[in-house]
Image (cartoon, grey):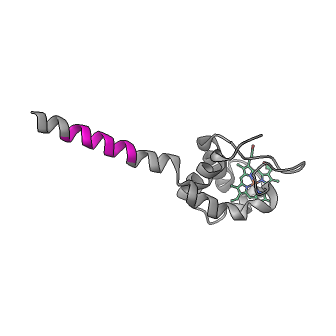
Amino acid sequence: MLTRKLIGAMMFVLMLSAGGVQAGGDAAKGAELAADCADCHGDDGKGDDEVPGIAGMDAAAHAKKLADFQSGAIDSEMADYVEGLSEQDFADLAAYFATLPAE
Ligand code: HEC
């Protein structure tokens, strides 16, 4: 009985940590990809007069925006800059920018 409970608890923890990595994305990987975004959004992700700031953006909302740019659901020049990126790349980028301070 005890062993079963223990195995159950371990599985639960494993599932949580595995899910966390996927849903949250890998911020370190995102930081590498973000080099391509810095030209416009700035090294700190704060943008300027013409480009919106993306630092501190909610990761889920950010990843969805990138997917919408790619699919064309949002018509934007951003489509060119997310071309060839995967859903995992979106999650990684979003995770990275979520770690940057918005102010
Ligand atoms: C050549 C300039 C340029 C590059 C490179 C670029 N962006 Fe953008 N980005 C823009 C502009 C301009 C907008 C606003 C236009 C729009 O929303 O249609 C924008 C909008 C966005 C938005 C929406 C922000 C909001 O609040 O709605 C996100 C998120 C974003 N970019 C992320 C990224 C990421 C991540 C990268 C790197 C993979 C990137 N951008 C590369 C110019 C750029």
* Residue at the (63%, 41%) spot, across then down: 61
Residue 62: x percent and y percent?
65, 45
Residue placed most toward the observer, 18 or 70: 18
Is 19 left, or right, of 24 in this rendering? Answer: left
Residue 43: x percent and y percent?
76, 57
Examine the rendered structure and indicate whether residue 3 appears above or below residue 49: above
Examine the rendered structure and indicate whether residue 61 appears above or below residue 95: above
Examine the rendered structure and indicate whether residue 60 appears above or below residue 90: above
* Residue at the (19%, 38%) spot, across then down: 6
Is 83 left, or right, of 103 in this rendering? Answer: left
Residue 59: x percent and y percent?
60, 44
Residue at the extreme right: 49
Residue placed most toward the observer, 9 or 62: 9
Residue placed most toward the observer, 89 or 97: 97
Residue placed most toward the observer, 80 or 58: 58
The magenta-colored residue range is 7-17
Examine the rendered structure and indicate whether residue 37 appears above or below residue 18: below
Taken as a whole, is the magenta stretch helix, strand or loop? helix
Quarter of the image for residue 58 reads top right
Instruction: Identify the image quadrant of the C terminus.
Output: top right
Residue 78: x percent and y percent?
75, 56
* Residue at the (32%, 46%) spot, across then down: 14
Is 20 left, or right, of 76 in this rendering? Answer: left
Quarter of the image for residue 77 reads bottom right
Q: Is residue 8 magenta?
A: yes
Is 76 left, or right, of 69 in this rendering? Answer: right
